[in-house]
Amino acid sequence: MTSTRFLILALSMGVTLLMVSDALAGPATDQLRTSVDLVVKILSDPELKKEARSLERRRAIRAVANQIFDFGEISRRSLAQHWQARPPAEREEFTRLFGDLLEQSYISKIENYSGEKIQYLGEAVDGDRAVVRTLIVTKQGTAIPVDYRMFLQGERWRAYDVTLEGVSLVANYRAQFNAIIQRSGYPDLVAKMKTRYDERPGPRETGPRVETGAAVTAPAPAPPRQSP
């Protein structure tokens, strides 16, 4: 995924948003909007803007990101057929590395941008799955469609994929991961991810990755059906 696409995807998580639309809102849209509003509140807090509290700010954003996204499901879908071949310990390691890299990418972009707008265009629900359609409007007036593919965990809607201008985040990473595995094997993919993990900028947290969203969600049911 290009850096520009990643920027816009990060913006869809809640960079100082100036406008929202109530068109055809439903439970999934309402929960997404509430989470975005929390991000806006965090970014707007003058105390949390201080450099000395940057780690606290990132932890707060990270907690909201885990409300919006199921990084474990995103990891499973991105690894696709290679997921089944991995033992539980390797699955846990992959989810931790990939989830952390995604979170850090979102957070680093979110902290550097403001003034963009988001419109909620509506949602389509099919049982325990939903697609929430949004539109990101840049300062230059460019409108970029961003759709969240979500599934229901208890009473919480969480995203397992995001499409940006019709391009799937999961499909993009799936192609990259598969190419690396086919070329040089799964251990090389993990090695590359560890290198990126160690080189990531910004303040660091120590200890294992924690699914902060778990505190606000019910236990997860069986994963949703794999999208074609």
Image (cartoon, grey):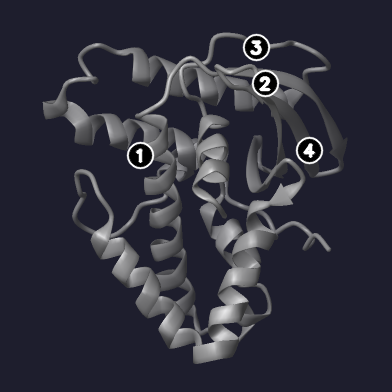
Which residue lies at the image location 52% right of the left edge and 15% below the top edge?
17
**Where does the image place residue 113, in percent across and percent down from the top left?**
41, 25
Q: Residue at x 45, y 70 (%)?
A: 94
Instruction: Tell me whether circle 4 and circle 3 mark residues in contact (CB < 8 Å).
Output: no
Labelled disc at residue 30 = 2
Per the model, the C-alpha gap separating discs 2 and 1 is: 25 Å
Judged by depth in the image, the label closer to the viewer, 3 or 1, is: 1
Relative to 48, is 80 above or below?
A: below
Can you tell which of label 4 and label 3 is closer to the viewer? 3
> Which residue type carries mark 3?
Val
Q: Looking at the image, is mark 4 or mark 1 earlier in the sequence?
A: 1
Give the quarter of the figure containing the C terminus.
bottom right
Q: Separation of disc 3 and disc 2 at Cα?
A: 11 Å
Quadrant containing the N terminus is: bottom right
Label 4: few (<14), some (14–19) or many (≥20) C-alpha neighbours in 10 Å? many
- Crowding near the residue tagged with mark 2, few <14, some 14–19, many ≥20 C-alpha atoms within 10 Å: some
**Amino acid type at image mark 1:** Ser
Q: Which mark is residue 108?
A: 1
Q: Which residue is mark 4?
A: 131
Q: Is residue 169 left or right of residue 6?
A: right
Residue 9 position by quadrant: top right
Mark closest to the chain's N terminus, 4 or 3 = 3
Label 1: few (<14), some (14–19) or many (≥20) C-alpha neighbours in 10 Å: some
In this rendering, the label closer to the viewer, 3 or 2: 3
